Each structure stands twice: as C-alpha cells, then as structure tokens.
Image (spheres, rainbow, N blue to C red):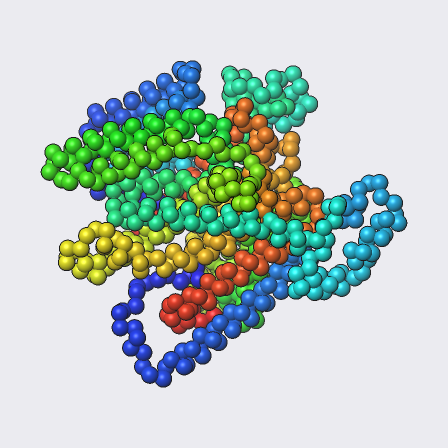
C-alpha cells in the first residue's frame, strides 16, 4: 500500500549529509556482509538486510529531495526488476550460461556446488547451473502468466460484455457458469484441470486461462452494465448502429482500462498459481526448469544446501513488483 | 455476493421504530430471498457434481490399469471394470455416482487395498478443520490489534512499517513461506533463540531510551516503556520457551495437546501470513473511515480515553465487513491448505487430493473435489444469507 500523502507528512527529512551518510552506512553494511566469511550466516544475512534497508531509506530520501515528494523509488525498482527478468528470459539462449537444461551435458560439473565465479548461485543435484535454470524458469513463469491472462481475459471479457448487453437468458447462463466455476477453490480446480491435461506449457496456459475466466466475466459484466446505461450508447442504438459496433466500438473501449489494470494483478496471481502447481509436481516436469519444480526438488536437500531455494527470491520479487506497479497505476488513475 | 457489500454506516440507535405492520412483509421478503439463495445454491452444487464427475472422465489413462498394475490378466481387468461400473454408459455412471453422493457413498479407492472413499475423507477432514480453525483464530488475534493501532497512527512510522511488511506477506507464495519457516524454526532453531534474546535486549534498551526522551519532552514515558517491555517479553519467551518443532508429520490430540499443537504450529503460521495481511488491510481501512465519523469526534471531545474511542466507538462498527471476509476465508482455506499439508506431510484432505491426482485414483479425486467445492459454496451462501439478517439494507441494495 503506497501512501504518498502520508509519506509527505511523515518524519522530518534530514539534510543532504545525513542522507548520504545513510546510503554509505548501508553500502558498508552490505559490503561487510558480502565480504566477511563470518561464523554465522544468519548474522551476515541480517547485516546485509539491514544495510539494504539503510541504503534504500537514504537513497529514497535523496531521490525525493531531487525529484519532489511524489517520487516513489520502489516503483522504479520494481519496474527495473521486471524489465531485467523479461530481458533475461527472452535472451536466455544468447546469454553465456553454464549448462542448465540437459543433465547429460553436465556430467563433468560438480553437483551441489556452492556459489562460485563459474556458477554464481551454485549447481543442483545434476550439476546444472541454478542461475541458468532460474532464467529459463522465468520463461515458463512469464509465458504462463501472460498467456493465461490473455486466454482468460479475452474469453472472460467477451463473455461478460455480451452477457451485460444482451441480458436475459444469456446473462443467466453465463452467470450460472461463472458461479459454478467460482465454487471451486482456485488450486483445486487447477489440480483437476492439471490431472486431465498433459503437463506442457501450452496446456498449463489453458488451465490457468480457464481458472481466471469467471473473474474477468464478473468484472467486465459489471463494468459493461454501467457503460451500457449511458446516453451515448442509447444514441448509438437510436442511430441504428449494429450490435457488434455497439459492443466493440462503444462499450469495449470504455471498460478496457479497468480490465487491463485488473489483468496486471492477475498475471501475478497466475505466476504464483503456476509455481504452486509446479511445486506439487503437476506442471512442467523436470528436468525442464520452472521456479516451482526447482523449489520442489530443493525441498529434500535445502537443510544442507540452502542455495537451492534461490528460485524463491525471483518468484517473490516478481510478484511483489507486479503488485507494486499495479497499485501505483491504480492510485494514479484514482487521483486523476 | 457478500463481497460487493460494503458497510457504509451503522444504523441509528432508534432502529426499533419500525412502523407497525411492516414486520410481516419484511419477514416474507427475507424468506423469499433465502429461498432463492437456496435454490441457486442447489443448482450450483448440481453444476459442481457435473464438473467434478465429467472432468475426471476426460483424464487420459485407464483407471483399471492404474489400479491393477501391469501384471493383471484381461479377466481380472474385466471383472474390476464391471464392478466399478465402467462398462456401462457414462450417463448411467453419473447418475449412479449422484445417488452415491446423496447417500454419502463415494465408492471405493482404486489404490489397493481398496477402502471406502468416504471413510478416507472422514478420517482426514478433522486435520484440515483444525488447521483452518487455528489459522483463523491466530490471524484475527494478530490482525485486529495491528489494524487498530495502524488506524490510530495512520501515516506514521508504525503504520507505514506494518503496511510494507504486510505488502511483502501478500507477495509470498504459501510454499515459500512454509519452507522459510522450516528453515528458521526447524533447521536453525538455535539462531532463532539467539535472535529472541537479542530482540529482548534491544527492545529493553530502545524502550528505556525512548522513555527518557519522552520525559525530557515532558510527555508520558509509559507508552515507550509498555511497548519496549512487551517486545522484550516476546523476545525472552522466544528465547526460553521455543519448543522443538517437527519437520513434518501430524500428532493427533489424543497423543497430548502440546505435541499436537507443535506439530501444526508451523503449517498454521505459514497459512496465517496472507490472512493477517488481508484482515489487517481491510480492518485498517474501515477503522480509518470510522475514526473520521462525527460520533468518534464527539466521544473524543467528551474526553473519552483513546482505548475507549478505538475499541468501543470504532472497532465494533468496523467489524462487520471483517466478519464477512473471515467467513469467505474459512471457505477458501478448505482448498487452501493443500500446499502446507503437502509440505508438512499432514494427513489432511489436501494431501489426499495431491496424492490421488498423482496416482490417478479418480474416485478419490472426484469425491475430494466435490466435498471441497460443496463446503466452499455452502459456506459462502450461508454468509450471504446471514448478512441479510444482520443488515436489512443488503436486501434492498442487492436483490438476488
């Protein structure tokens, strides 16, 4: 929840020297945490986290002093992360990564290697590079998140739009179908679909798409009802516009903004849903990496090799970033 | 839907002044509303049975082969096929299954040795229900104080810190939370105890410093002392009282309440993350709205204490939408415990569903999906109906 108003009225902003001191202190703490092989990894972790918090606080104050109090560095960080992950996933084949897909190619690599220069995040039980798998796994997550929203959003919006305009029996049937689909808890429906479909990326997209159809139907139906009552729609009808023209040229453009801002949040939900399904072993199978199935494989070994849990970090950051940007966009829309 | 209903304001105190004669029509209206909800509910449950039956019929693979394994003779396969009714038309099978559902008979498991599915489900339901109950209670116990204090200090440091931490909670997938908890409390329990001690010391020092600064500003040092003391107590409790949590498994209550609670503590904690965030954000928003109302101002002007204003004047009317969301959460948790049951190997309905989907044990999957969905939609409808009794405006705002 971003509270720009509240932030402006918050604590007294220290002068420039204080802000730089905060950034420096944070950098020193992070540096200490990274460079000193101290006894307790927990202490290093704590120092690093503390350093990041300080550095962020100092940097955000500096930036706010430079760009005005409305500046939200968190949103920029979130955007940078998303851009980086999309870029990495798109160019994964071109990046100079150690072998991370085919176990038979990685026979000479050390297994369960600790992070090093050759393997920045270590290797897994087959000797496959964890960082490379995370980047390839990002492909699955992003494709499935976007594909699912594309399928579910298109079908759901069209259904909801049609139901809101035609009313009557069509509306009743669509509403009943929506209620039936919504009466399955999401993960349960997803598991049932996964049991039916072969676990491939395309099918997972389809299952996730079906999963989100009802919420898009609800949203677009409600928004469509509101717009359909407006005078310009009546005018278009009076002028003899065809039903298709009214639906797609008059009503659809008016409900599109709210559908799109909702779709962004659904991408985050679907990425988590796919990861959960992968974690349960019902999505894309090993050795093809996804964030969820990597974590599932790490579950047996993470007491001795905690670095295998690394995919949890990009998963968390991606979902967090999407939520953050979604909230920022919505807040901007409401502020207008 | 109850989700669309927002509680705008409380009813004025003189609500008993209903004109004579309107009571009966109102009751009739309510009855008609409830009846329509029940009819709707039944039609939706019929749809649910349809989907849970026919979706699984599309599953690739032969259930008989799954049950018997590769060494079965054709005669054995034919016998099992006949005893499962798989040689008859699909519609007959569906009607047969429906008849079973009505009488509580979901057939037998395919996994050998074959047992009645309803027995399997009944044995696992209590575990899931315990998880749900504890999760809701714990979430509320954390969320309500957090929300009250956040609303009181809206926009200040405490509120912003709580908001951003909860924001992180929302973005944390359930299995990540569960594994992190295992890592902390099972693998590094010693570090957690040390951290508890460190927290206790730090809280004491910070509390004292804050109290001294408050004295210098001639403000009351009590809040700082109380806050610091409470945090120090929590830290000390973590240091001394932290039990050994098992990595996985479930201990029934009959083997001792303490062992039972430690075996479900981590799963419940993992489940509470999201719920705490949802409850706190909702209640905080309602409370901020309520605190801006004239009756709160009046009460403040009369010099009532902060505690009275927060709890008696604001919290009570704000609880309304929270109660709805708690109900919805209970419904969602029935399917939502799957992940933690899987991570912690708890013998609940969710882990039954996971193993049956993996093994292709379709009678169990059908039954589990149906039971979960039926409970979920029934709970939601009950909330809707209860709502119309609690707040008559819903009937007018939202007629079916």
For the residue pair B186 and B24, the one nearer the viewer reads as B186
Q: Residue furthest bottom?
A: B21
Up/down of B209 relative to B289, above or below: above
Q: In this view, does A194 lie to the left or right of A62?
A: right
Q: Is residue B373 left or right of residue B215?
A: right
Q: In this view, does A254 lie to the left or right of B251?
A: left
* x and y percentages locating residue A161 in the rendered image: 51, 62
Can residue A254 be seen? no
For the residue pair A214 and B93, the one nearer the viewer reads as B93
For the residue pair A224 and B382, the one nearer the viewer reads as B382
Please tell me in which quadrant of the rendered image residue A90 appears. Answer: top right
Can residue B305 be seen? yes
* x and y percentages locating residue B263 in the rendered image: 52, 39
Q: Which residue is drawn at 51% across and 55% down?
A: B331
Q: Which residue is drawn at 34% across and 32% down?
A: B236
Q: Which residue is drawn at 56% across and 71% down?
A: B39
Up/down of B122 relative to B249, above or below: below
* x and y percentages locating residue B386 in the rendered image: 44, 66
Number of numbered discs: 0
Q: In this view, does A189 lie to the left or right of B387?
A: right
* x and y percentages locating residue A2 in the rendered image: 33, 43
Q: Residue at x 29, y 28 (%)?
A: B201
């Amino acid at each position: 929840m971003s509270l720009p108003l509240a932030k402006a009225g918050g604590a007294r902003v220290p002068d420039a020297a204080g802000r730089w001191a905060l950034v420096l202190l944070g950098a020193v703490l992070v540096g200490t945490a990274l460079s000193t092989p101290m006894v307790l990894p927990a202490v290093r972790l704590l120092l690093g986290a503390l350093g990041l918090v300080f550095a962020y606080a100092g940097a955000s104050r500096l930036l706010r002093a430079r760009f005005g109090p409305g500046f939200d560095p968190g949103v920029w960080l979130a955007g940078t992360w998303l851009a980086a992950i999309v870029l990495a996933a798109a160019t994964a084949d071109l990046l100079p990564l150690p072998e991370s897909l085919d176990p038979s190619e990685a026979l000479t690599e050390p297994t369960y290697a600790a992070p090093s220069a050759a393997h920045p995040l270590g290797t897994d039980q087959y000797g496959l590079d964890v960082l490379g798998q995370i980047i390839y796994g990002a492909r699955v997550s992003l494709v499935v998140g976007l594909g699912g929203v594309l399928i579910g959003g298109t079908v759901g919006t069209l259904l909801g739009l049609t139901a809101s305009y035609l009313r009557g029996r069509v509306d009743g049937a669509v509403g009943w179908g929506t209620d039936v689909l919504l009466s399955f808890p999401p993960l349960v429906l997803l598991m049932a679909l996964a049991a039916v479909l072969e676990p491939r990326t395309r099918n997972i997209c389809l299952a996730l798409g079906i999963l989100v159809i009802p919420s898009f139907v609800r949203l677009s139906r409600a928004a469509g009802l509101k717009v359909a009552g407006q005078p310009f729609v009546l005018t278009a009808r009076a002028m003899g516009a065809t039903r298709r023209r009214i639906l797609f040229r008059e009503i659809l453009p008016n409900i599109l903004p709210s559908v799109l801002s909702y779709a962004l949040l659904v991408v985050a939900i679907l990425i988590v849903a796919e990861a959960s399904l992968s974690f349960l072993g019902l999505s894309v199978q090993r050795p093809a990496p996804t964030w969820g199935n990597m974590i599932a494989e790490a579950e047996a070994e993470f007491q001795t090799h905690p670095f295998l849990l690394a995919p949890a970090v990009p998963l968390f950051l991606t979902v967090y970033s999407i939520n953050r940007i979604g909230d920022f966009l919505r807040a901007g829309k409401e502020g207008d | 839907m109850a989700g669309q209903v927002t509680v705008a304001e409380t009813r004025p105190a003189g609500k008993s002044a209903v004109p004579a004669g309107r009571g009966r029509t109102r009751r009739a209206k309510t009855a008609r509303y409830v009846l329509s909800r029940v009819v709707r509910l039944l039609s939706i449950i019929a749809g649910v049975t349809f989907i849970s039956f026919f979706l699984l019929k599309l599953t690739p693979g032969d259930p008989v082969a799954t049950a018997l394994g590769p060494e079965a003779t054709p005669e054995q396969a034919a016998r099992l096929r006949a005893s499962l009714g798989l040689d008859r038309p699909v519609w007959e099978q569906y009607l047969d299954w429906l008849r079973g559902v009505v009488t509580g008979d979901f057939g037998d498991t395919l996994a050998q040795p074959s047992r009645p599915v309803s027995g399997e489900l009944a044995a696992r339901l209590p575990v899931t229900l315990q998880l749900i109950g504890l999760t809701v209670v714990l979430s509320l116990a954390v969320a309500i104080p957090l929300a009250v204090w956040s609303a009181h200090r809206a926009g200040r440091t405490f509120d912003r810190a709580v908001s951003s931490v909860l924001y992180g909670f929302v973005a944390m997938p359930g299995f990540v939370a569960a594994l992190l908890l295992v890592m902390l409390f099972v693998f590094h329990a010693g570090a957690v105890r040390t951290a508890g001690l460190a927290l206790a010391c730090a809280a004491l020092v910070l509390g004292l410093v804050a109290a001294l600064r408050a004295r210098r500003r001639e403000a009351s040092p009590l809040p700082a002392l109380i806050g610091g003391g409470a945090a120090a107590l929590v830290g000390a409790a973590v240091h001394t009282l932290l039990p050994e949590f098992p990595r996985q498994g479930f201990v029934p209550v009959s083997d001792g309440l303490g062992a039972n609670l430690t075996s479900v503590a981590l799963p419940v904690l993992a489940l509470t993350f999201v719920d705490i965030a949802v409850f706190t954000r909702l209640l905080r928003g309602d409370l901020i709205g309520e605190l801006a109302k004239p009756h709160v101002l009046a009460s403040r002007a009369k010099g009532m204490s902060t505690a009275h204003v927060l709890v008696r004047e604001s919290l009570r009317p704000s609880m309304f939408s929270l109660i709805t969301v708690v109900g919805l959460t209970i419904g969602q948790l029935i399917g939502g415990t799957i992940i933690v049951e899987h991570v912690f190997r708890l013998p609940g309905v969710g882990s039954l569903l996971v193993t049956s989907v993996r093994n292709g044990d379709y009678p169990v999957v059908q039954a589990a999906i149906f039971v979960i969905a039926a409970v979920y939609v029934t709970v939601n409808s009950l909330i809707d109906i209860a709502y119309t009794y609690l707040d008559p405006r819903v009937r007018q705002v939202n007629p079916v």
